Amino acid sequence: METLIELYDERPLENVLGVEMFRPARVVYVCPEEAARDTRLQEKLRAYFTHRGQRVELIFMKASVYDTDSMLQLFRKLAERYPGCALDITGGTDAVLFAAGLHSAELPIPVFTYSRRKNSFFDIRNAPFAADLPCDVSYSVEDCFLMAGGAMRPGRVDNSILPLYLPDVEPFFQLYMDHRRQWNRIVSYIQRLSPTEQDGSFSLLASGNYTVKGEQGTRISAPEAALRDLQKIGFIRDLEIERDQHVSFHIRDGQTRTWLRDVGSVLELYIYKACLDSGLFDDVRTSAIVDWEGDGGDHAVTNELDVMCTRGVTPVFISCKTGEVRTEALNELAILRDRFGGKIARAAIVTAERGGAAMRNRAAELDIQVIDLRDLAGSRLEQHLRTLMATPRD
């Protein structure tokens, strides 16, 4: 088709999916006044299509989206200016949809829509090209951020090197499960023996007293059993322990050091690998940093997604917590999911504790699936991932 009329929506997917599926030469966005005058937003949308390799002319038309008569006049004007155009009614307000219906009754223009539940397009009127048409578009994690006007920034983990470490993930996670109750103290001890200098430099040699200062005046003695287990799985070597005196060892490499100094990394890595192994997803990332405005400025608002996946057009947001899940964490996850994924996106929270009733109730209210210690210990993780993907959101 030459021209596609799109009803601009706050949900990013609904602004781009019809364009990517039917590849028009020109798109006219019928949008509220604030979007019509937001040139920055418009340039980001143009940049998104360029990123996706699609050359398309974008036109933004201001509309009184709650005034049916005004909308009807605009649709008439567009049909006259762009003969042979088609109308995608997937997004937009009720008033806009009503006006579009009135307009399609006047003129036999093609009208179609997209169903999230069926992941298919449908012919509403005079659009046989969209009749029961399955959507075959697929997105990466970065695509999801870009279509919403954001950007993906480098996180704590270089995802390109993770394939080298995949054989280490399950032994590392099993070690964590064996020492889960002391994990915070174990990580704190390693942090004290392997500090980072002010200039960012560090040594792979960890060395220090058998007992070190913890937080709030506590004392932490060397976690001997955990250190020996870390040596068994190859994360450290040359371990020397002088009881009540001194401890030293070499950490395998810089990436391993990062994981041993961060409490949550082991769970994030395990969930990342489980998502890969499930075969459910087209793209899987850990430590995905989203820049909300996409400009990378000094005052940019950013959030880190512990694990994020995509399958087709569906993004999945996963937050990992080794401790208790607080309401704030659930709220933040829901906000990120809705902002960068819209109604089609899914979300799950993974905790290495037994999720309590209050937390589960709040998660259910926000349509967030809970995966807790019993699921991790009982090898039910893949089952939960499949359930998550098989259950559409309302």
Image (spheres, helix red, strand yellow):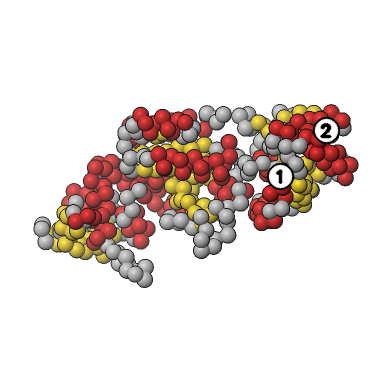
Give the camera-side residue of 257 and 264: 264
The residue labelled by disc 2 is: 103
Say whether residue 393 is visible.
Answer: yes
Circle 2 crowding by C-alpha within 10 Å: few under 14, some 14–19, many from 20: some
The amino acid at mark 2 is His
Which of 331 and 128 lies nearest the eye of the viewer? 331
Residue 9 placement (x, y as % from top left): 67, 41
Looking at the image, residue 228 sits to the left or right of residue 115; the answer is left
Say which of 255 and 29 sits in front. Answer: 29
Whether residue 44 sits left or right of residue 287 in the image: it is: right
In three-dimensional space, the C-alpha distance between marks 2 and 1, rounded to whole angstroms, equals 19 Å
Task: Name which residue lies at 76% across and 47% down.
Answer: 62
Q: Considering the image in quadrants, where does the N terminus appear?
A: top right
Asked which quadrant contains residue 64, the reply is top right
**Quadrant assignment, res 325:** top left
Quadrant in which the C terminus appears: top right
Q: Residue furthest bottom?
A: 199
> Whole-percent x and y of residue 164?
42, 53
Residue found at x 51% / y 42%: 335
Local SS, label 1: loop
Q: Which residue is mark 1?
A: 32
Picture residue at 28% right of the left edge, 44% below the top: 176
